Amino acid sequence: MKLGHRLSSIVDMIPMQYQHIWDCCCDHGLLGAEMLNRQLAKQIHFVDIVPDLMATVEQKLQRFYPIATDSNAHLPQWSVHTQDVAKLPLADYNGTQLIVIAGVGGDLMASMVNSLIQNNPQLTLDFLLCPVLQVATLRSTLIQHRCSLLDELLVTENKRFYELVYVRYQAEGLAASKPLNNPLVSLFGDKIWQLPRNSHPASTLQTADLQRYLTVTINHYQKVAHNKGQQVDNLVAGYQHVLQQLS
């Protein structure tokens, strides 16, 4: 099955440098299957907490991506994990790891990322994240953990906008001894507003699209403030400032 623009953009963002990639995208294994096709890592891990869903995914993997033998030992391997994303056994695996999470709200995604980092402070972990709404909550969590920005991109699919945020958490102690040259994650985004994005052929957005997304986001947080009484004035002001810069 062909991937939609959002999932295709996620795969396009992943460099071929990982030992392990964890597909936590609630997409019935489509993203991980494309990673296997492109041989993006030595092992692709498929993760979901729903047993029936993972049983179906495993059956399809066994059919289309049989476990390696002498004739196909060079191909990437796969494994299936029926469990909570927040409790992934990352410490059981050696080598570089990327956790890809999409298809859930920013609040839940922030909780997942927070748990993974707190449970594995000794590991350097990369995250590629695509939340549904509440992006500021997720970015705030990444800022708290001093995550470095590797890349970010805004994509649209079915008239909805999605932020793709690709970051790195450096293991405790390593951040001080071997700091990255990359900037830290920002609350409102940085590269995401820069046009043209020649490094991302998948991005066809124009300035008007960015302005529309910002307007939708501002309206969302204004409604949150009105309906729930939450103090989000700083978010509204921050996104309004970005919008003014694009005008």
Image (spheres, rainbow, N blue to C red):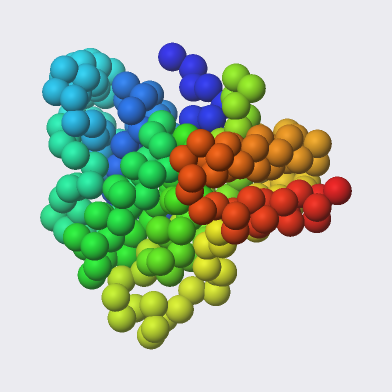
Question: Compared to 230, does 35 lie above or below?
Answer: above
Residue 247 in percent (x, y) is at 86, 48
Q: Nearer the viewer, residue 71 or 206?
A: 206
Name the residue: 25% across, 55% down.
Answer: 116
Residue 231 in percent (x, y) is at 51, 53
Please identify the residue farthest to the right as the structure is shown: 247
Left or right for 29, reference 92: right
Name the residue: 74% across, 56% down.
Answer: 241
Name the residue: 66% across, 57% down.
Answer: 238
In which quadrant is the N terminus drawn? top left
Q: How many marks can you see?
A: 0
The quarter of the displayed image where residue 157 is located: top right
Residue 239 in percent (x, y) is at 67, 51
Residue 37 in percent (x, y) is at 40, 29
The quarter of the displayed image where residue 207 is located: top right
Name the residue: 31% across, 71% down.
Answer: 171
Residue 229 in sight here: yes
The quarter of the displayed image where residue 33 is located: top left
Q: Nearer the viewer, residue 97 or 138?
A: 138
Left or right for 151, reference 218: left
Residue 80 in sight here: no
Left or right for 22, reference 145: left
